Amino acid sequence: MTTCQQLKDSVRPDCCRISDPIPSDAECFERDISKELEKLKRRHERMFVKRRRLMEMAVPRVLVSRFVPKCPCPFTKSIEMVYPCQAQSYTRTEQLALPTVRRLLYRRRVAILAGDEIGESILNRWLRYSYMSLYSRLANSQPLTKPKKKKKKTEKQLAKHDKYIAKLATPKVPPKPPKPERKAGEVDKARLKTLSSPRAYVEEVKPKWELTPDMKNFKASRRLKMIAAHIQRDNVHINETPEKVSPNALRYKPSARIKEMSEPLKTRDANQGLADVKENPFSISPNALKYKASSRIKELAEPKEFENTHIRENPFAISPAALKAKASPRLIELAKPKGG
């Protein structure tokens, strides 16, 4: 037996019960508490089936223990029982049988989260054994250490960190893919696809005009009335003080050319027909009768002689390739008359 920490009240044996005195303020509740405890005791007794055979089998065969029972009350510290299977071993098989430190640390973390103090103490003992084992020392398994507190960053370091975060926050612009090289006469497929796709026209739907109550009660401002008034301009075409006509203009006589230009142009009237139609449209001009055609005109006037390739010299002659040809099954099938 080895002694370690002080004995807790939760693990104190039944022989060493500590009964705290009831305070004077709570003596009035003693009667009610005793009644509740009596009810709980009766309920507990009714939960078990008391049979004679079961009670006989519940009695242990060997009533005398191997060890002399000794009350641990005289000891000032709690007693931790170390069984032979839990003692530190030195053989290779026993060293390998110890669980790994990593697994024990994980189970210890789970026990701490679950609030299992007994399991935590057992795992702490196993950790001590595992840390001191040969294979843990070979693996250089270090015991648990408290995490170091991080130092606060200076203003210069914080500014540098913020600048770095801002740099990372800016999105990267992907590089544009290079244009594919096209040979002479080759068509750009992407451009052709873009041009072939129809345009999306958005139809402009004009809302229906309605005379709203606000428009009925609207009163134009002074500025609107001033803008709406039309501008009055001076009439430059009317000369209130006309000048005298010169005597030369009164005695002027137009020439023949001016009279010719003053006449209106001859236009075609749909009802009367063409105004400048000749009397004999089929008459030949004397210059055309005296005209002599040039050699080039004569050459162009002669019709071209085209060779007729469809007419053969011997239409009944059969080519040697046709004589050697063999009809395919498909031709034989097509040569048969329909419905035959």
Image (cartoon, grey):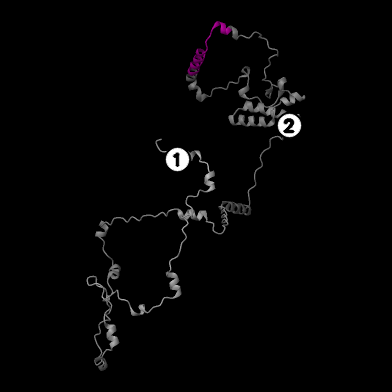
Of 61 and 296, the residue lying toward us = 296
Position of 315 with respect to 269 (left or right) is right
Q: In which quadrant is the N terminus drawn?
A: top right
Work out whether 203 lies above or below 130.
below
Position of 158 with respect to 88 (left or right) is left
Q: In which quadrant is the C terminus drawn?
A: top left
Q: Amino acid at mark 2?
A: Ser
Q: Amino acid at mark 1?
A: Ala
> Can see residue 286?
yes
Q: Position of residue 177 (x, y in %)?
A: 57, 54
Of 325 and 183, the residue lying toward us = 325
Which image quadrant is residue 275 in? bottom left
Query: Which residue is located at x 27 percent, y 83 percent?
Result: 262
For mark 1, what is the residue? 335
Position of 214 with respect to 160 (left or right) is left
Work out whether 34 lies above or below 211.
above
Seen as rendered, the residue at the extreme top is 52
For mark 2, what is the residue? 136
Query: Which residue is located at x 76 percent, y 29 percent?
Result: 134
Q: Secondary structure at mark 2?
A: helix
Magenta residues span: 35-55
Work out whether 159 lies above or below 326.
below
- Please tell me whether residue 38 belongs to the stretch shown in magenta: yes
Q: Decide: few, some or many residues near mark 2? Use Cα within 10 Å; few <14, some 14-19, many ≥20.
A: some
Q: Give the overall secondary structure of the magenta segment.
A: helix
